Image (cartoon, grey):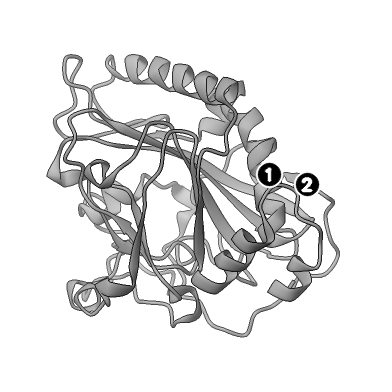
Amino acid sequence: MTPDEILSYPARVLTQEQRETYFDKGFVNVDEIVPADILKSLQDTTQDFVEQSKSVSVSDDRFDIGPDHNASNPVLRRLKSPDTASEAYWNFSTGLMADVAADLVGPNVVFHHSKLNFKWFDASDTVKWHQDIQFFPHTNYNVLTIGCYLADTTMDNGPLAALTGSHNMDLFNQYDADGNWTGMLSDKDAAGINMDAVEYMTGKAGSITIHNARTLHYSPSSKNPVPRPLLLNCYTSADAKPYTPHPSPTVNTYKVVRGSQVRWAHHDPRPCQLPPDWSGGYSSIYAAQAGEDKGAKSMM
């Protein structure tokens, strides 16, 4: 569906101005949209998983931990696939967030994946400049991620930042010179970004960020010793079909969460770089950008 076609449907949750901002900039943030009771449930559930991670010494299929992680100083970088980890997370994915997605991809919405990323007081927690769609190419670009801040997020907490209008620019190469997947721009490409056009999406707990899968984004390291969790849910329009294996599928992958399945795929003529073959599994963007996934090569 085109932006005009999507905007012709009545809004469920967002204002028309917020929807238009998303299509214009490639992202939008919405302050304190999550009801207090739902937010509290998500926060309590998240703290339970942080406690559970203290018993883990190496990353596994649920927890992605930093090199200095230990029981007294947990450095949980990511809770993988929260949609299967707790009913609270899945209810959130299929509830309010699915309505938000429908306002921006159209009435037929497919769940792609979820993850829960943490920011710790550690310079290594920077998420470098990248675009999402190269991780999971689709036949069109009605693919987006909605992040929910589970704690107040200021410039000291490493907020999500995005380059205005970058969803309409060319996609970047996210392999290094040796053909290894890095999941990020090269230093040269990143140095060319116009930082004057970058917006930092801060917000109170319960605020959300939404960015298109083509949008260039990153988040700086946190300057706050209190960890900042960001719950992310990715959705696609039902007429956006994947070209490659899913990086980390769950039982909920490709479920229709609003509307119905469709019989025709929509094809955007703009090309998209292909990622490595994810059929053998995927760790995390932290591992890729830190060089922990050396050997992940192009599918060519």
Query: For residue 6, what is the image quadrant?
Result: bottom right
Expressed as whole percent of the image width and height from the top left, the position of residue 93 reads 62, 37
What residue appears at the point 43 percent right and 75 percent down from the top-left corner?
Answer: 166
Query: Where is mark 2, residue-wise?
Result: 258
Query: For residue 200, what is the image quadrant?
Result: bottom left
Q: Is residue 266 above or below residue 157?
A: below
Q: Does residue 254 appear in the picture of this structure?
A: no
Q: Does residue 26 appear in the picture of this structure?
A: yes
Which is more toward the observer, 198 or 70? 198
What residue appears at the point 58 percent right and 20 percent down from the top-left corner?
Answer: 37
Q: Secondary structure at mark 2?
A: strand
Expressed as whole percent of the image width and height from the top left, the position of residue 260 reads 84, 51
Q: Amino acid at mark 1?
A: Ala
Residues at marks 1 and 2 touching, judged by CB atoms closer than 8 Å? yes
Which is more toward the observer, 9 or 1? 9
Q: CA distance from mark 1 to mark 2?
A: 7 Å
Query: For residue 298, what is the image quadrant?
Result: bottom left
Q: Secondary structure at mark 1?
A: helix
Say which quadrant the C terminus sits in: bottom left
Q: Residues within 10 Å of mark 1 (few under 14, many from 20)?
A: many
Q: Which mark is residue 98?
A: 1
- Left or right: residue 121 compared with residue 142: left
Say which quadrant the N terminus sits in: bottom right
Expressed as whole percent of the image width and height from the top left, the position of residue 144 reads 56, 58
Q: Is residue 221 above or below residue 119?
A: below
What residue appears at the point 21 percent right and 42 percent down from the top-left corner?
Answer: 222
Expressed as whole percent of the image width and height from the top left, the position of residue 247 reads 49, 51
Q: Amino acid at mark 2?
A: Arg
Q: Is residue 123 above or below residue 196?
A: above
Q: Earlier in the sequence, mark 1 or mark 2?
A: 1
- Left or right: residue 115 compared with residue 227: right
